[in-house]
Amino acid sequence: MSVVKVRPATLVDAVALPPIDRDAGQIFRQFPELAWLADGEGMPVERHRAFIEKGAAWVGVDENNTPVGFLDAEVVGGELHVWEMSVHREWQGRGLGRALMAAASAYATRAGLTALTLTTFRDVPWNGPFYERLGFAAIAPSGLSARLRQVLADEVAGGLPKDRRCAMRRIL
């Protein structure tokens, strides 16, 4: 099993993405206080379609062109905000997350954007530490834009623990 390529997501791909999201979320069962995340439905198909229609969504596909991972993003001002990146557990640890982020970065660079942003768990190994290895840096609370402050506030309102969340930026 090897990933053939990362390509722009199509509307046809959208129905395959929530199951990937749900499967990837199972890894949160490693943390009892976050295990409830594994029971979520993941991002709905309609939201995936919206990102795809805006042209800022990518999939990693297997040799049959079947999606096994995805990254959904959105251009906000001069930055590309990564809303979600998920890789099916059978495909994790093979560089697919890096490849998806490279596709998003290349897109942002071509579009003349200045940075990539995202919000994540600061202490979960496949979150904050993973993104740091890709060149992202946590943004101090005093340096957060109003947009990122609102994203974090919405996440906390949705039940995510405030003390474990952070916003990160990678300057291009």
Image (tube, grey):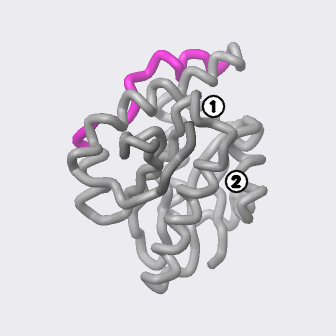
Decide: marks 2, 1 in contact (CB < 8 A)? no
Q: Nearer the viewer, residue 152 or 23?
A: 23
SS at mark 2 in the image: helix
Q: Where does the image place residue 73, in percent across and percent down from the top left?
A: 42, 58
The magenta stretch spans which residues?
Answer: 33-47
Residue at which label 2 appears: 131
Q: Amino acid at mark 2?
A: Tyr
Image: 167 above or below 172: above
Q: Which disc, if any, is residue 161?
A: 1
Residue 120 percent coordinates (x, y): 62, 45
Q: Residue at 37% x, 63% y: name it.
A: 56
Crowding at mark 2 (Cα within 10 Å: few <14, some 14-19, many 20+): many
The answer to whether one can see residue 23 in this image is yes
Q: Which mark is residue 15?
A: none
Residue 83 lies in the magenta stretch: no
Q: Is residue 140 visible?
A: no
Q: Residue at x 56, y 36 (%)?
A: 1
Q: Position of residue 126 (x, y in %)?
A: 70, 39
Query: Is 90 situated left or right of 57 in this image?
Result: right
Judge from the rendering whether residue 90 lies leftward or rightward of residue 158; answer left or right: right
Q: For the residue labelled by badge 1, is the local secondary structure a helix, a strand or a loop? A: loop
Question: Which residue is at a point 41% across and 69% down the rendered structure image?
Answer: 76
Reply above or below: 66 against 35. Answer: below
The dominant secondary structure in magenta is: helix
Quadrant position of the C terminus in the picture: bottom right
In this rendering, the answer to whether 167 lies above or below 108 is above
The amino acid marked with disc number 1 is Pro
- Residue 144, position in %: x, y? 62, 63
Q: Mark 2 or 1, which is nearer the eye?
A: 2
Mark 1 residue crowding within 10 angstroms, few (<14) / some (14–19) / many (20+): some
Q: Residue at x 70, y 18 (%)?
A: 30
